[in-house]
Amino acid sequence: MSNRPDSRGTASGSGTANRRGAGNDRWLIKGARVLGGVAADIRVAGGVIESVGEGLVADGATVFDADGLIVLPGLVDLHAHLREPGREDAETVETGTRAAALGGYTAVHAMANTEPVADTAGVVEQVWRLGRQAGYVDVRPVGAVTVGIGGENLAELGAMAESAARVTMFSDDGHCVSDPLLMRRALEYVKAFGGVIAQHAQEPRLTEGAQLHEGEVASRLGLAGWPSAAEEAIIARDCLLAAHTNSRLHVCHVSTAGSVEIIRWAKSKGWQVTAEVTPHHLLLTDDLAENYDTVYKVNPPLRTRDDVTALRNGLADGSIDAVATDHAPHPVEAKETEWAQAAMGMTGLETALRVVQEAMVDTGLLDWAGVADRMSVRPARIGQAAAAGHGQPIAPGSPASFTLYDPAAGRERVDPAAHASKSRNSPFAGMTLPGRVHATFLRGVPTAGDRAGDGRW
Amino acid sequence: MCATKPEPRHEQRGDQEVPGPGWKAVLAPEEIRRALSRIAHEILERTHGGEGTVLLGIPTRGVPLAQRLAARIGEFEGTPAPHGSLDVTMHRDDLRLRPARALQRTEIPPDGIDGKTVVLVDDVLYSGRTIRAALEALGDLGRPRGVQLAVLVDRGHRELPIRADYVGKNLPTAQREVVRVLLEETDGTDRVLLGERVRPGPDSPGSPGSRLGDGARPDGGDR
Amino acid sequence: MKRHLISAADLSREEAVLVLDTAAELAGVSARPIRKLPTLRGRTVVNLFYEDSTRTRTSFEAAAKRLSADVINFSARGSSVAKGESLKDTALTLEAMGADAIVVRHGASGAPHRLAGWVTGSVINAGDGTHEHPTQALLDAFTIRQRLGSPDHGASGRRGAGLDGVRATIVGDVLHSRVARSGVLLLSTLGADVTLVAPPTLIPFGVGGWPCKISYDLDAELPKSDVVMMLRVQQERMTAAYFPTVREYRRRYGLDAGRMSLLPDHAIVMHPGPMNRGVEIAAEVADSPRSTIVEQVSNGVIVRMAVLYLMLGGVEGNS
């Protein structure tokens, strides 16, 4: 069959051009359960969903037997580190977006802390073009708030917004915009072009040398604590600033129960505050650091069971809008070291949906429509990717960007060596997780597929 | 075992095993008593009245044997012979063959051993490696005029050029056999038993009385 | 014994008592004219010191040498470590050299854990960051048992005894102290009742789960203490606002002659060294008969001999 991928997880060759050249751009997805609900056929032509219904005929389209699979709108990640330019040893736009497609994503927001920092129109356009060339997902660059993520002077936010990359989200992620006046100015300034400031909430003085969540485990391990209050204090301040400036604040990787409370309160006031949580904070806790295994070192740190519970509930009730991976690949040597010297971060693109099923769906906290909302619809809205056709309903006229997922696939062990990401620092390594992404389509083009699965292709 | 004399764990484990039916007694309490009396007399004879003699028992069972010999000499001569204990663990050449073991007491009489005749006392003489270690350990403690060796049982199979000066009983044995010495002080009864190793192998703990010294098997197992 | 000694929590009560008993027997060796034992002949012990600590390094070196081990000193200065070699590469180098044991001192908490994952030999933690220093705790326990015995056991320093009922008060910068962490774990394992005394800024945030009590009032604790262990206070803590001035710290938490008189007659005063005379401990306290500071140093060698013997003296990989 002409559209059979030539290896696990890839469409033929690389690049959209190749895939488009594969000939048939007409697909009939047979019997997929839309958002986990009723099974239906989906006919795709010209990159758009033509019709959704029962008993549709192939009429020359390639048939994809999706019996037992669910179909979700293509996932949108608000937070990934693709490392290019500068740290191509850890990840490239090509490998990172390939990992994203395998994880069910059709759009990824690429964080600005590259080398050089994405603080000019030139750098964000470079990243955007690399994403277009790779063709696996839409890469949406995030611009730095301050020059060089130095926390002192505003970067040229307007120039980035008007660049070919059309940047709408700005973040110094990795560092907090801790200066309250600078944060206020940034929130005000982006109103001119409808931007949003995504804050990495970490009070720097309270977290000097911080290594692990400040609590029983850190004190026993002799690791400097990262107190919850250091996150919550910044979130509270920024919520007040967002209200005062009537601007949009997005809170990155919320990790504490207290943060959920504050965001819930800010939302109740009608303020323009949104928030994300990572898959790892929905599943893992600080006691995993017991043996100083640096794969569990991340910023913000893994917290306690109570925090995990509060984050899950916050995501379920919508206080937290989105799941964002904070995919942070690192080369082996950055992790094979003493804990204090190890790099912070975990990969996550290829495991996110499975982790969300484990933490949210299989626990009954969220149904698949809810997953679609938190992993596609709302993040697309926050990142303003909706205009580019992301987070749309599975309905006629929508771009054919969707994910076919088998929630009933047997629990399989996570093996980072098999990941498309260049890096292997997955905290889920060795864990068994449910589910499997079978295929991802971006505007009618398969960007990931699983030939090894059951020969559906 | 005697409650007032705590023993290290591995010894306790061995001691809790009760000798089974496959074991035959080779020395009865009365025979042990007579053997010790004879050795005491021989020591007095060989050391010209025991003057300047120090008895050092090698733990575990060499220590009560040395005490008994010293007491017996005291009965004969009016003054008990100075006695003590000498732990040889740190001088063994077979440490890497078994888990590290607890050290036992080394107690030297106040006058020391310089210029004295030291009689080393052990329960069973087998490969001779314990005695070699004892001679080394002794060298660290001082410079005796002479060193002699007293054992309750000599079962043969020497691996070093060592022989005992005083022997309670010569007991021809096969390598696969196990000699087990029981004493009032450590085991609640006086007896010497001969049996067969239940499971063959260098570290078989299957026999009652398997102990870490010369008593049960050649040091370092069957080589 | 386990393969590695990284945390005082690695030791069961039985194992800790075995170390103390072994050390008690070895104490006799140190008193003899010939101090060397052949026990670890042919074994290689590497001292891998990323922090300067002449005191701990020489203590381990003396212990290993008295057991006839070959000792290699691998210090950060004058080695490839200074050129930025990673801990893992250093570990592989030492492994290739055939190290049977690596004694490691490192500024980063958890470095010995990481090291243990990369080598086949035993790893002995000689102090890692603000985490632990288990051999210091062992020598402290040995010193306490020697001086006080255990009230429940009568005779002092009795073989097989723990520290049941001993009331130990550890005073000072607990937050940054690896001595305190190991001390709390080991002394409580041995049955002692441990109380930490410090200004609240120097008590770890998550101390609730530790097997000890917490107090901010030294004067209230001293009359109830059989042992008072003073921790070194680094002057630079003052700049980080842990306490206002050295003078105030001394006034509230320093042990001077007046405070010492609050102790019961039999109580002892310990310090892991190096001392800040005139800060946490007054000179007349450090030099008083209650002070065990010099004994702690000599006991350090004996206890480390016991640890090396128990970890290396037996069959490889024993449990």
Image (cartoon, coloured by chain):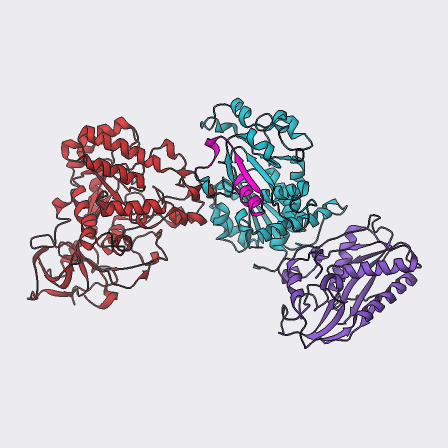
Q: Is residue B24 above or below residue A451?
A: below
The answer to which image quadrant residue B193 occupies is bottom right
Residue B35 visible in image: yes
Residue C192 in the figure: left or right of residue A341: right
**Which residue is rendered at x = 18% and y = 38% of the image?**
A168
Q: Which residue is pictured at 62% across the width and 29% down the height? A: C262
Residue C193, percent from left and from top? 56, 41
Image: A170 above or below A345? above
The answer to whether C268 appears left or right of B188 in the picture is: left
| Residue B65, percent from left and from top | 79, 62
- Find residue A394 and report its image quarter: bottom left
**Quarter holding the C terminus of chain A?**
bottom left
Chain C rendering hue: cyan
Is C191 magenta? The answer is: yes
> Left or right of C239: which side holds A424?
left
Q: Position of residue A246 (x, y in %)?
A: 17, 30
Name the quarter where the N terminus of chain A is drawn. bottom left
Coordinates of residue A139 in the picture (x, y in percent): 20, 46
Above or below residue A64? Residue A257 is above
User: Does the magenta portion include A45?
Assistant: no
Closest to the observer, C1 or A142: C1
Q: Which chain is purple?
A: B
Nearer to me, C102 or A374: A374
Q: The red chain is which one?
A: A
Q: Which of C195 and A248 is in front in this view?
A: C195
Q: What stretch is highlighted in magenta?
A: C179-205
Q: Which residue is drawn at 45% across and 45% down?
A: A338
Badge count: 0
Q: Quadrant of residue B124?
A: bottom right
